[in-house]
Amino acid sequence: MKKFLHIENIYVSYGSIDALKSVSLHIEEGEVVTVLGANGAGKSTLLRCISGLVPLRQGDIFLLDKSLKDSPPHDIVQNGISHSPEGRKVFATLTIEENLNLGAYVRRKHTREIQQAKEHIFDLFPILKKRRRQLAGTLSGGEQQMLAMGRALMSNPRILLLDEPSLGLSPLIVKHVFEIIREINSQGVSILLVEQNARKALGVANRGYVLETGKISISGTSTELKSNQKVQEAYLGGSALKKHQL
Amino acid sequence: MQVVIEQIINGLTIGSFYALIALGYSMVYGILKLINFAHGDFFTLGSYVGYTVLVFASAALTAYFGIWGMIAIAMLVAAISVALVGLIVERMAYRPIYASGRLPAVVSALGASIVIQNSIMIIWGPRYQAYPAALIPNIPLQILGFNISLLQLLILVMSFILMLSLYYVIQKTTFGAAIRATALDRDTAALMGINFNKVILFIFILGPALGAITGVMVGMYYRQISFTMGWNYGLKAFTATILGGIGNLPGAMLGGLILGTLEMLGGAYISSAWKDVFVFLILILVLIFRPTGILGEKIAEKV
């Protein structure tokens, strides 16, 4: 295994506020890595800077040996990093099929491959096939999440960035979303998962990082994080609640 | 009844002028949320470039291409040169201040409008210019008993072809979907791999080119052009954009056609002196009662 995506000591600021301070992390090929943290800790900012939407003030991001620091977002997708953003952000007035086609925009000339990719997405999410001609805005929250993930997969990424895929969804749908995450990973896509649902996230991830006010405070394998007292108290609902749930 | 229908045909003719200009407004607004007040002047500039081509086309050229060929060449030259000017205006007047917000961009657009308008005045002079009337045949036709000139028919057919092809590109192709996606959510569109600068390039080539072609058509139809006419046409096309739903391209086309027809009917049956009043009355009524326009209704996004 080699270091696939490597984030080195990055700083990001919005005006005078530092959103990320000296953040370093990496993803190895085939891994699921999760980033846990409270609201406003900088999780989404981290993903947005990997995909080039937010400029770095300092530090660098490497995909294998290639620096992504100065690449615009559309080049970063081309390099195999796909991003399913927070709040799903499906294109509401476009049809489901158009949303998926745009997911494959970087390889729009290869119509046969796109067709195959679409079939693959429809296998993964049969509901999308049934509603392919419907406007994306008419889908339920869970269906929109599936569309957002499907759309991100259409570019045939090597790394998938998932921002809060379980946000606002019912427990049953959340369970389904995490099954899909596992399946996507088993097909060879590395995943960087940002989640508030720490229990679910650690259940699917190999390793994890905890982001606190823009800094990484704890990192380790999922097993290590699950048994870490601080993580238990802050993100897994504390020991009292845990006993209750187990 | 015959007169009403002929008036409606006249209305659709000027309505298609408004519609073609409105498309340029609507595309730029959809992507940049900027009301490009210089757009009416792109239209005027196109009209003058077409005028120059037609006036200075030599007899030999006209003999070789025929008069319709010469008109096509005039439109093409106007479209290409005005598209270039559109790109320059975007680079010089808009791009440097995108980051400063929407109001500075509107002021800059007004500035660009003044610059283009005065450049036209300096180059071609402040007086009205007459389109070479002798060149353009005005053959009256009778179709199903209705009087319509050949020129009018051509304008209508050509406008509809232009509008339908734009509609096809925007609604049916992947690039069109990319443009619509960029208008909805620029960041997420970028995550799909859509290059924002290419989208801007497209709208600032196509919008001014459509405006320029309309300018040539207006010159042929009214046979008289002035360097200030972009303001009036621009305002009416802007009204058409609001009427149809700003940022919505089918809406811009529909708004233009409706506005032209109402203006013509109002002018014919109420008072021609008041026809501009009808147009702006419609603008005010739409803004009060249906600010999203006819087709501008948004589908609520579920969260």
Image (cartoon, helix red, strand yellow):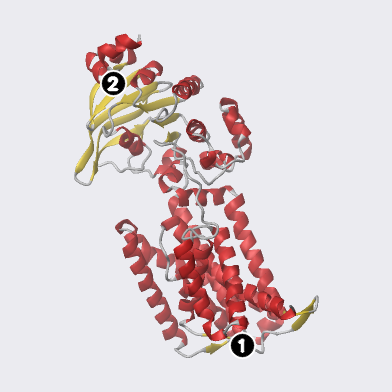
Chain on which label 1 sits: B
Left or right, B69 with reference to A39:
right
Q: Residue B132 carries which label?
A: 1
Residue B79 in which image quadrant: bottom right
Give whichever of B239, A152 is nearer the camera. Answer: B239
Q: Residue furthest left?
A: A16
Residue A23 drawn at (x, y percent)? 25, 31
Note whether B46 is above or below B287 in the view shown.
Answer: below
Give whichever of A212, A46 is nearer the camera. Answer: A212
Q: Which of marks 1 and 2 is in front?
A: 2
Left or right, B100 with reference to B244:
left
User: Residue drawn at (50%, 50%), measured in percent from left and top?
Assistant: B298
Tell me how many marks there are.
2
Q: What residue type is labelled 2?
A: Tyr
User: Residue drawn at (63%, 69%), measured in percent from left and top?
Assistant: B159
Residue B10 drawn at (x, y percent)? 65, 77
User: Residue drawn at (46%, 60%), measured in percent from left and top?
Assistant: B291
Give whichever of B281, B88 is nearer the camera. Answer: B281
Chain on which label 2 sits: A
Residue B77 visible? The answer is no
**Quadrant in the picture for the N terminus of chain B:** bottom right
Note whether B265 is above or below A163 in the view shown.
Answer: below
Q: Which mark is residue B230?
A: none
Residues indicated by labels 1 and 2 sit on the same polypeptide chain: no
Q: Is mark 2 on a helix, strand or loop?
A: helix
User: Residue drawn at (47%, 91%), measured in percent from left and top?
Assistant: B127
Q: How far apart are marks 1 and 2 (CA)?
A: 79 Å
Q: Name the residue that disc number 2 marks.
A: A235
Residue B155 in which image quadrant: bottom right
Q: Which residue lies furthest to the right in this view?
A: B144
